[in-house]
Amino acid sequence: MSSAVDPAISGLEGLPRRNGELVFTAPWQARAFGVAVALCERQGIGWAAFRSRLIEEIGTWEREHGADASGWDYYERWLASLERLVLDFGLVDGAEVEARVARIAHADVHDHDHD
Amino acid sequence: MTTGKDEGDRYAALRTRAIESLLIEKGLLSEQAVDVVVEAYGSDIGPLHGARVVARAWSDPQFKGRLLKDATAASRELGVGGFVSEYVRAVENTEGQHNLVVCTLCSCYPWGLLGLPPAWYKSPEYRARAVREPRAVLREFGVELPDETEIRIWDSSADLRYIVIPRRPEGTDGLAEDELAALVTRESMIGTGLARQPVA
Protein backbone atom coordinates (compact mmCIF):
# COMPACT_ATOMS: atom_id res chain seq x y z
CA MET A 1 0.00 0.00 0.00
CA SER A 2 1.37 3.42 -0.87
CA SER A 3 1.74 6.28 1.58
CA ALA A 4 -0.96 8.13 -0.33
CA VAL A 5 -3.60 6.31 1.70
CA ASP A 6 -2.12 7.27 5.07
CA PRO A 7 -4.83 9.84 5.91
CA ALA A 8 -7.45 7.13 5.54
CA ILE A 9 -5.49 4.68 7.65
CA SER A 10 -4.99 7.18 10.47
CA GLY A 11 -8.75 7.21 10.92
CA LEU A 12 -8.74 3.48 11.49
CA GLU A 13 -6.35 3.33 14.41
CA GLY A 14 -9.08 3.16 17.01
CA LEU A 15 -10.92 0.35 15.32
CA PRO A 16 -10.88 -3.12 16.76
CA ARG A 17 -8.55 -5.73 15.40
CA ARG A 18 -9.14 -9.35 16.04
CA ASN A 19 -6.72 -12.10 15.16
CA GLY A 20 -4.65 -9.29 13.67
CA GLU A 21 -7.37 -8.45 11.22
CA LEU A 22 -9.49 -5.35 11.04
CA VAL A 23 -13.16 -6.08 11.48
CA PHE A 24 -13.93 -3.02 9.37
CA THR A 25 -11.45 -1.51 6.95
CA ALA A 26 -13.12 1.91 6.79
CA PRO A 27 -15.25 3.75 9.36
CA TRP A 28 -18.27 3.93 7.04
CA GLN A 29 -18.41 0.11 6.97
CA ALA A 30 -18.95 0.03 10.74
CA ARG A 31 -21.71 2.65 10.43
CA ALA A 32 -23.44 0.84 7.55
CA PHE A 33 -23.27 -2.38 9.54
CA GLY A 34 -24.61 -0.75 12.70
CA VAL A 35 -27.40 1.11 10.90
CA ALA A 36 -28.72 -2.07 9.27
CA VAL A 37 -28.66 -4.10 12.47
CA ALA A 38 -30.03 -1.35 14.72
CA LEU A 39 -32.72 -0.38 12.22
CA CYS A 40 -34.01 -3.94 11.86
CA GLU A 41 -34.05 -4.36 15.65
CA ARG A 42 -35.72 -1.01 16.30
CA GLN A 43 -38.31 -1.24 13.55
CA GLY A 44 -39.09 -4.92 14.00
CA ILE A 45 -37.90 -5.70 10.48
CA GLY A 46 -36.99 -9.37 10.22
CA TRP A 47 -33.36 -9.97 9.41
CA ALA A 48 -34.45 -12.13 6.48
CA ALA A 49 -35.64 -8.94 4.75
CA PHE A 50 -32.15 -7.53 4.85
CA ARG A 51 -30.50 -10.80 4.05
CA SER A 52 -32.59 -11.48 0.95
CA ARG A 53 -31.52 -8.11 -0.45
CA LEU A 54 -27.91 -8.79 0.43
CA ILE A 55 -28.06 -12.12 -1.40
CA GLU A 56 -29.48 -10.38 -4.46
CA GLU A 57 -26.89 -7.62 -4.38
CA ILE A 58 -24.04 -10.11 -4.04
CA GLY A 59 -25.48 -12.36 -6.74
CA THR A 60 -25.90 -9.47 -9.16
CA TRP A 61 -22.37 -8.26 -8.54
CA GLU A 62 -20.94 -11.71 -9.10
CA ARG A 63 -22.88 -12.23 -12.32
CA GLU A 64 -21.69 -8.89 -13.63
CA HIS A 65 -18.06 -9.38 -12.67
CA GLY A 66 -17.62 -13.07 -13.42
CA ALA A 67 -14.31 -14.49 -12.30
CA ASP A 68 -12.74 -11.07 -11.76
CA ALA A 69 -13.27 -10.29 -8.10
CA SER A 70 -10.64 -7.56 -7.94
CA GLY A 71 -13.20 -4.82 -7.30
CA TRP A 72 -15.04 -6.84 -4.67
CA ASP A 73 -16.09 -4.92 -1.60
CA TYR A 74 -18.41 -6.77 0.73
CA TYR A 75 -19.61 -3.69 2.60
CA GLU A 76 -20.45 -1.88 -0.62
CA ARG A 77 -22.92 -4.71 -1.28
CA TRP A 78 -24.08 -4.36 2.30
CA LEU A 79 -24.67 -0.63 1.86
CA ALA A 80 -26.55 -1.17 -1.41
CA SER A 81 -28.78 -3.69 0.41
CA LEU A 82 -29.40 -1.25 3.24
CA GLU A 83 -30.34 1.47 0.78
CA ARG A 84 -32.78 -0.83 -0.99
CA LEU A 85 -34.27 -1.92 2.32
CA VAL A 86 -35.02 1.62 3.49
CA LEU A 87 -36.49 2.52 0.08
CA ASP A 88 -38.56 -0.67 -0.22
CA PHE A 89 -39.97 -0.20 3.27
CA GLY A 90 -40.80 3.42 2.47
CA LEU A 91 -38.67 4.71 5.35
CA VAL A 92 -36.99 7.28 3.13
CA ASP A 93 -37.41 8.04 -0.53
CA GLY A 94 -34.80 8.08 -3.24
CA ALA A 95 -34.99 11.82 -3.90
CA GLU A 96 -34.39 12.51 -0.22
CA VAL A 97 -31.29 10.35 -0.24
CA GLU A 98 -29.88 12.08 -3.33
CA ALA A 99 -30.60 15.51 -1.88
CA ARG A 100 -28.93 14.58 1.39
CA VAL A 101 -25.90 13.11 -0.38
CA ALA A 102 -25.54 16.33 -2.38
CA ARG A 103 -25.90 18.45 0.74
CA ILE A 104 -23.28 16.54 2.71
CA ALA A 105 -20.90 16.51 -0.26
CA HIS A 106 -21.32 20.25 -0.61
CA ALA A 107 -20.76 20.82 3.11
CA ASP A 108 -17.62 18.66 2.96
CA VAL A 109 -16.13 20.81 0.22
CA HIS A 110 -16.58 23.87 2.39
CA ASP A 111 -15.54 22.28 5.65
CA HIS A 112 -12.67 19.89 5.68
CA ASP A 113 -12.49 19.75 9.43
CA HIS A 114 -15.47 17.50 9.95
CA ASP A 115 -14.92 14.13 11.57
CA MET B 1 -3.06 10.29 -5.65
CA THR B 2 -6.67 9.26 -5.71
CA THR B 3 -7.37 5.64 -6.44
CA GLY B 4 -10.60 3.97 -7.47
CA LYS B 5 -10.73 2.40 -4.03
CA ASP B 6 -10.46 5.78 -2.30
CA GLU B 7 -13.16 7.15 -4.56
CA GLY B 8 -15.42 4.19 -3.80
CA ASP B 9 -14.86 4.62 -0.07
CA ARG B 10 -15.63 8.32 -0.22
CA TYR B 11 -18.83 7.71 -2.14
CA ALA B 12 -19.91 4.89 0.21
CA ALA B 13 -19.12 7.00 3.27
CA LEU B 14 -21.25 9.81 1.88
CA ARG B 15 -24.24 7.59 1.17
CA THR B 16 -23.94 5.91 4.57
CA ARG B 17 -23.99 9.29 6.31
CA ALA B 18 -26.94 10.41 4.20
CA ILE B 19 -29.02 7.33 5.04
CA GLU B 20 -28.10 7.31 8.72
CA SER B 21 -28.84 11.01 9.18
CA LEU B 22 -32.22 10.75 7.41
CA LEU B 23 -33.27 7.76 9.53
CA ILE B 24 -32.24 9.57 12.71
CA GLU B 25 -34.12 12.74 11.72
CA LYS B 26 -37.25 10.71 11.11
CA GLY B 27 -36.95 9.15 14.55
CA LEU B 28 -36.52 5.65 13.13
CA LEU B 29 -33.08 5.22 14.60
CA SER B 30 -30.79 6.84 17.11
CA GLU B 31 -27.09 7.42 16.81
CA GLN B 32 -26.64 5.69 20.15
CA ALA B 33 -28.40 2.56 18.93
CA VAL B 34 -25.96 2.36 16.04
CA ASP B 35 -23.03 2.97 18.38
CA VAL B 36 -24.17 0.14 20.65
CA VAL B 37 -24.30 -2.33 17.75
CA VAL B 38 -20.94 -1.27 16.35
CA GLU B 39 -19.35 -1.46 19.77
CA ALA B 40 -20.87 -4.85 20.57
CA TYR B 41 -20.01 -6.60 17.33
CA GLY B 42 -16.90 -4.62 16.56
CA SER B 43 -15.11 -5.26 19.82
CA ASP B 44 -17.09 -6.87 22.64
CA ILE B 45 -18.18 -10.03 20.86
CA GLY B 46 -15.44 -12.08 19.35
CA PRO B 47 -14.48 -15.67 18.75
CA LEU B 48 -13.64 -16.01 22.44
CA HIS B 49 -17.31 -16.64 23.16
CA GLY B 50 -17.33 -19.62 20.84
CA ALA B 51 -14.00 -20.79 22.24
CA ARG B 52 -15.47 -20.88 25.75
CA VAL B 53 -18.38 -22.93 24.50
CA VAL B 54 -16.06 -25.42 22.79
CA ALA B 55 -13.80 -25.67 25.86
CA ARG B 56 -16.83 -26.44 28.02
CA ALA B 57 -17.93 -29.09 25.54
CA TRP B 58 -14.48 -30.70 25.68
CA SER B 59 -14.53 -30.70 29.49
CA ASP B 60 -18.12 -31.66 30.16
CA PRO B 61 -19.67 -34.48 28.09
CA GLN B 62 -23.15 -33.66 29.35
CA PHE B 63 -22.79 -30.08 28.20
CA LYS B 64 -21.54 -31.34 24.86
CA GLY B 65 -24.65 -33.47 24.57
CA ARG B 66 -26.84 -30.45 25.18
CA LEU B 67 -24.77 -28.38 22.77
CA LEU B 68 -25.17 -30.88 19.95
CA LYS B 69 -28.89 -31.06 20.62
CA ASP B 70 -29.54 -27.32 20.87
CA ALA B 71 -26.50 -25.09 20.56
CA THR B 72 -28.52 -21.93 21.02
CA ALA B 73 -29.84 -22.99 24.43
CA ALA B 74 -26.57 -24.54 25.58
CA SER B 75 -24.59 -21.41 24.66
CA ARG B 76 -27.00 -19.34 26.68
CA GLU B 77 -25.99 -21.32 29.76
CA LEU B 78 -22.65 -19.55 29.38
CA GLY B 79 -24.31 -16.21 28.75
CA VAL B 80 -23.43 -16.34 25.06
CA GLY B 81 -25.81 -15.46 22.27
CA GLY B 82 -27.68 -12.54 20.87
CA PHE B 83 -29.02 -10.96 17.75
CA VAL B 84 -28.80 -13.00 14.56
CA SER B 85 -27.45 -15.90 16.49
CA GLU B 86 -30.75 -17.36 17.54
CA TYR B 87 -30.52 -20.70 15.80
CA VAL B 88 -27.09 -22.19 15.99
CA ARG B 89 -26.25 -25.79 15.36
CA ALA B 90 -23.01 -27.32 16.62
CA VAL B 91 -21.35 -29.97 14.46
CA GLU B 92 -18.58 -32.09 15.90
CA ASN B 93 -15.39 -33.11 14.16
CA THR B 94 -14.46 -36.75 14.63
CA GLU B 95 -11.81 -39.03 13.25
CA GLY B 96 -14.09 -39.91 10.36
CA GLN B 97 -15.72 -36.57 9.71
CA HIS B 98 -14.48 -33.02 9.34
CA ASN B 99 -17.01 -30.21 9.17
CA LEU B 100 -16.64 -27.05 7.13
CA VAL B 101 -18.98 -24.08 7.30
CA VAL B 102 -19.76 -21.69 4.48
CA CYS B 103 -22.54 -19.34 3.49
CA THR B 104 -22.79 -19.80 -0.25
CA LEU B 105 -25.28 -16.98 -0.81
CA CYS B 106 -24.01 -14.20 1.40
CA SER B 107 -22.29 -14.17 4.77
CA CYS B 108 -24.45 -15.81 7.45
CA TYR B 109 -22.32 -16.52 10.47
CA PRO B 110 -22.93 -17.11 14.19
CA TRP B 111 -22.21 -13.52 15.26
CA GLY B 112 -23.04 -14.10 18.90
CA LEU B 113 -20.48 -16.88 19.16
CA LEU B 114 -17.75 -15.82 16.75
CA GLY B 115 -18.17 -12.09 16.24
CA LEU B 116 -18.17 -10.81 12.67
CA PRO B 117 -16.86 -13.02 9.89
CA PRO B 118 -13.35 -12.57 8.52
CA ALA B 119 -12.96 -11.08 5.05
CA TRP B 120 -12.16 -14.43 3.40
CA TYR B 121 -15.41 -15.95 4.68
CA LYS B 122 -17.37 -13.31 2.77
CA SER B 123 -15.28 -13.51 -0.40
CA PRO B 124 -16.80 -14.84 -3.64
CA GLU B 125 -13.87 -17.26 -3.90
CA TYR B 126 -14.37 -19.01 -0.57
CA ARG B 127 -18.14 -19.13 -0.95
CA ALA B 128 -17.80 -20.83 -4.32
CA ARG B 129 -14.83 -23.09 -3.68
CA ALA B 130 -15.65 -24.41 -0.20
CA VAL B 131 -18.41 -26.50 -1.72
CA ARG B 132 -16.72 -27.38 -5.00
CA GLU B 133 -13.26 -28.33 -3.75
CA PRO B 134 -13.20 -28.32 0.05
CA ARG B 135 -10.06 -30.41 0.29
CA ALA B 136 -8.08 -27.96 -1.82
CA VAL B 137 -9.44 -25.04 0.19
CA LEU B 138 -8.49 -26.74 3.45
CA ARG B 139 -4.99 -27.42 2.13
CA GLU B 140 -4.59 -23.69 1.42
CA PHE B 141 -5.53 -23.04 5.04
CA GLY B 142 -2.83 -25.51 6.03
CA VAL B 143 -5.19 -28.32 6.96
CA GLU B 144 -4.28 -31.70 5.55
CA LEU B 145 -6.80 -34.43 6.32
CA PRO B 146 -6.44 -38.16 5.77
CA ASP B 147 -8.18 -39.38 2.60
CA GLU B 148 -10.52 -41.48 4.74
CA THR B 149 -11.86 -38.44 6.56
CA GLU B 150 -15.13 -37.35 5.08
CA ILE B 151 -15.60 -33.59 4.70
CA ARG B 152 -19.09 -32.32 5.34
CA ILE B 153 -20.10 -28.89 4.16
CA TRP B 154 -22.70 -26.92 6.09
CA ASP B 155 -24.31 -24.03 4.23
CA SER B 156 -25.38 -21.33 6.68
CA SER B 157 -28.63 -19.51 6.24
CA ALA B 158 -30.47 -16.70 7.96
CA ASP B 159 -32.29 -19.24 10.12
CA LEU B 160 -29.53 -21.69 10.84
CA ARG B 161 -25.90 -20.97 11.49
CA TYR B 162 -23.16 -23.40 12.41
CA ILE B 163 -20.27 -23.72 14.78
CA VAL B 164 -17.76 -26.52 14.45
CA ILE B 165 -16.57 -28.31 17.58
CA PRO B 166 -12.98 -29.09 16.63
CA ARG B 167 -11.28 -32.23 17.89
CA ARG B 168 -9.65 -31.83 21.26
CA PRO B 169 -5.86 -31.91 20.85
CA GLU B 170 -3.91 -34.81 22.38
CA GLY B 171 -2.14 -34.18 25.63
CA THR B 172 -4.65 -31.71 27.04
CA ASP B 173 -6.18 -33.92 29.75
CA GLY B 174 -4.93 -31.85 32.66
CA LEU B 175 -5.83 -28.45 31.24
CA ALA B 176 -8.39 -26.14 32.80
CA GLU B 177 -11.25 -24.78 30.74
CA ASP B 178 -9.69 -21.37 30.14
CA GLU B 179 -6.46 -23.02 29.05
CA LEU B 180 -8.44 -25.17 26.64
CA ALA B 181 -10.32 -22.14 25.31
CA ALA B 182 -6.97 -20.60 24.36
CA LEU B 183 -6.41 -23.52 21.96
CA VAL B 184 -9.66 -22.94 20.11
CA THR B 185 -9.06 -20.65 17.15
CA ARG B 186 -11.72 -18.90 15.14
CA GLU B 187 -10.74 -20.91 12.06
CA SER B 188 -11.15 -24.18 13.98
CA MET B 189 -14.78 -23.25 14.71
CA ILE B 190 -15.45 -22.57 11.02
CA GLY B 191 -13.65 -25.72 9.98
CA THR B 192 -10.83 -24.08 8.05
CA GLY B 193 -8.43 -24.84 10.88
CA LEU B 194 -7.77 -27.27 13.70
CA ALA B 195 -7.45 -26.51 17.39
CA ARG B 196 -3.92 -25.49 18.46
CA GLN B 197 -1.59 -27.98 20.06
CA PRO B 198 -0.71 -27.01 23.64
CA VAL B 199 2.78 -25.65 24.16
CA ALA B 200 4.70 -28.40 25.91
Image: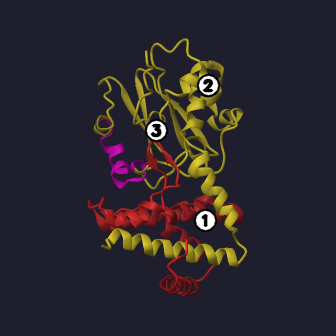
Chain colours: A red, B yellow
Please name the residue shown 65% across and 75% down the image: B23
- Tell me where residue B26 sits by quadrant: bottom right
Check if mark 2's residue and mark 3's residue have beta carbons within 8 Å: no
Looking at the rendered image, the disc whose residue lies closer to the viewer, 3 or 1, is: 1
Q: Which residue range is magenta in the image?
A: B120-135
- Number of the label disc, if any, that sits on residue A57: none
Find the distance from the CA under tag 3 to the CA under tag 1: 27 Å
- Number of the label disc, if any, that sits on residue B56: 2
Inspect this view and state whether residue A44 appears.
no
Question: Which residue is identified by label 3?
Answer: B190
Parent chain of label 2:
B
Q: Secondary structure at mark 2?
A: helix
The quadrant in which the C terminus of chain B is found is: top left
Find the distance from the CA under tag 2 to the CA under tag 3: 17 Å
Task: Give x and y (percent) for residue B47.
Answer: 54, 39
Q: Residue furthest front?
A: A113
Residue type for callout 1: Val
Question: Which residue is identified by label 1?
Answer: A35
Parent chain of label 1:
A
Task: Give x and y (percent) for residue B51.
Answer: 55, 32
Q: Is residue A26 left or right of residue B37?
A: left
Find the distance from the CA under tag 2 to the CA under tag 1: 34 Å
Q: How many labels, in total? A: 3
Badge 1: how crowded within 10 Å, few (<14), some, or many (20+)?
Answer: many
Inspect this view and state whether residue A19 appears.
yes
Residue type for callout 3: Ile
Badge 2: how crowded within 10 Å, few (<14), some, or many (20+)?
Answer: many
Please name the residue shown 31% across and 44% down the image: B132
